[in-house]
Image: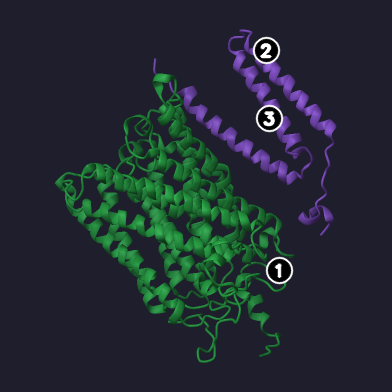
Chain colours: A green, B purple
Amino acid sequence: MSTIVSLPDQATAKLPHKSYLNEEYGLKSWLLTGDHKRIAILYLISITFFFVIGGVLAGLIRLELLTPPADLMSTDTYNKVFSMHGIIMIFLFLVPSVPATIGNFLIPLMVGARDLAFPKINLLSWYLYVIGGIFILSAMVLGGVDTGWTFTTPLSTHYLNTHVVTAAMGIFVAGFSSILTGLNFIVTIHRMRCPGMTWFRLPLFVWGHYATSIIMILGTPVLAITLVLVALERTINIGVFDPTKGGDPLLFQHLFWFYSHPAVYIMILPGMAVISEVISTFSRKRVFGYTAVAFSSVAIAVFGFLVWEHHMFIMGVSQYSALVFSLLTMLVAVPSAIKIFNWSMTLYQGSITFETPMLYAFGFIGLFTIGGLTGIFLATLGMDVHLTETYFIVAHFHFVMVGGMLMAYLAGVHFWWPKMTGRMYPEAISKLSAIVTFIGFIVTFFPQFLLGYLGMPRRYAAYPADFQVLNVFSTAGASILGIGYLMPMLYLPWSLIYGKIAGNNPWQATGLEWQIQSPPLTENYVEIPIMDHEAYDYEWLANKTVHEVQTVG
Amino acid sequence: MSEKNDPEHQEQHIVGPKVYLLVFLALMVLTATTTGVAFIDLGVFNPIIALAIACVKASLVVLFFMHIHYSSRLLKMTVLAGLFTFLLLITLTMTDYISRAWGMW
């Protein structure tokens, strides 16, 4: 099988003498750093930690559902386990996953800057994330919270005696971390592009993160204030959501989903941003319809704010309003489809090679398409009544979030691993892990579509015996999926020491970040680069070295 | 790159104490008006007037105390984006509240 990977001669190759990794040593140099690359690594470690916890909880859920009765844990514990799984995976893993790690690392490199606009705010956002994480972990350790990740009122405000306020405060604090990251990205992309880097020469990765940052800044404050209202209603009984005091429980749903639906796009847009880079690099072609893909990111960010009521169709909202929201929800399919079709057109007649990031990217395209199209089912008013609050919806959003975003995240981690660490991951086993993840994913979540269609409700520990076969499939798939995720967690650290030296540009990619040493210097660029070509210009790359004088020593 | 676009050398508009004082006085007068109007029964117009005055006050704070009046068009647009999102929240939520009871009598 052909490959485009070009590594330096391993006998003589060495890691660069000086890089951001060895500029300074010691814990203090990491915890007080202003370097966006080091903060990205801090984020990488912390989100992996939370991913493991969330993943173990997911394993417990699947184990419980292996048999029809609630036998592994009590039903109360089950409620707490799935609530914690949701809260940790969404707020502590998916929302910061690509933006705070890969985005943090790459956006300054891609726009040709030495750091983000506000390095100290960047560090602050990591600390806020950790503080939020500690709040959420304490809620779990102190006895858990069983509202589900949606904090539905009046359940969360009146009927539960668990640690709702602690968990809500954790999300509140972690929310500010995400706002600060978004702010940093927007200012950096506006003000710190290098000479010649016009908006339409930016890599699509940057466009995707720009759109994400807009949602982070405009949406997250609404969630923060909503959770404060829940906490106030619990503690001092103000009557915003309580009907006996003139409030309206549906108001909570409006406010919560006003953030939490766009939050889905916070999670998926950076994933799409990664896929644009990967698809282009491994098909050796400029992304088809660059402008359309760039604007579709922004369109998704804008439309994302207009569709939230589709989470509420069965909650007694106005049917006329529901009609409008159903139509608007269908509209989001348009920019998403623009992306999928443009990536497919990029592949058309490209010189495709099947490196690990590309395998993950293929996984993304397939799984995200299924996840997105089942979203259309759910946007349809009549269909939604039957399918919502069943396993169909669980399968739908796991296809988008896990099949889409997690695949894209792993594609990104593998793609930029050589840039982050200077070393290659082991090729054969990583391809195996991409395939195992894909198979495990399909076996886990495809049966859930069937279960949901047959009427198995979500969030119950017990189910009728008729559903057992499909549930056994799903649990078996989850164990395969677990192995798929465990493999990168083992071989990536291994590669830090034993991996092959990657050199500056192992993929022969065109991005500015690939033209400098791996791992980069603390200041990224010795001289601020001048962008004199379009993004994804492979001819420029091919001609670049022709007249270059290669001196040694 | 012209000096105006360079963040390091951005032209700083210096606002004199007179402007601050005038805005402060306007805010005080409007606060007094809000309080005064609250004692008159205008039916449905009471909350409308109170909210209208509050909007004027917020605009004064944003425009002068937060310097948006003197800022670049990009910053003005950024502020308007926040306002626009807020209006989306209100308007689209109201589509539910206004029409919820239609056809139910």
Is A117 placed left or right of B104 in the picture? right
* Local crowd size for mark 1, using a 10 Å CA cut-off: few (<14), some (14–19), many (≥20): some
Mark-to-mark CA distance, 3 and 2:
19 Å
Q: CA distance from mark 1 to mark 2?
A: 61 Å
Q: Residue at x 63, y 75 (%)?
A: A515
Q: Going 25% across and 45% down the picture, which residue do you hit?
A: A77
Q: Which residue is mark 3?
A: B58
Chain of the residue where label 2 is placed in the rendered structure: B
In depth, the one of A232 and A329 nearer the eye is A232
What subunit carries mark 3? B
Q: Which mark is residue B36?
A: 2
Nearer mark to the viewer, of 1 and 2: 2
Can you tell which quarter of the image residue A377 is in?
top left
In this figure, which residue is indicated by the disc labeled 1? A531
As measured in the structure, the alpha-carbon distance from the residue carrying label 3 to the one carrying label 1 is 43 Å
Q: Amino acid at mark 2?
A: Gly
The residue located at (41%, 28%) in the rendering is A249
Tell me whether marks 3 and 1 sit on the same chain.
Answer: no
- The picture quadrant where one finds residue A521 is bottom right
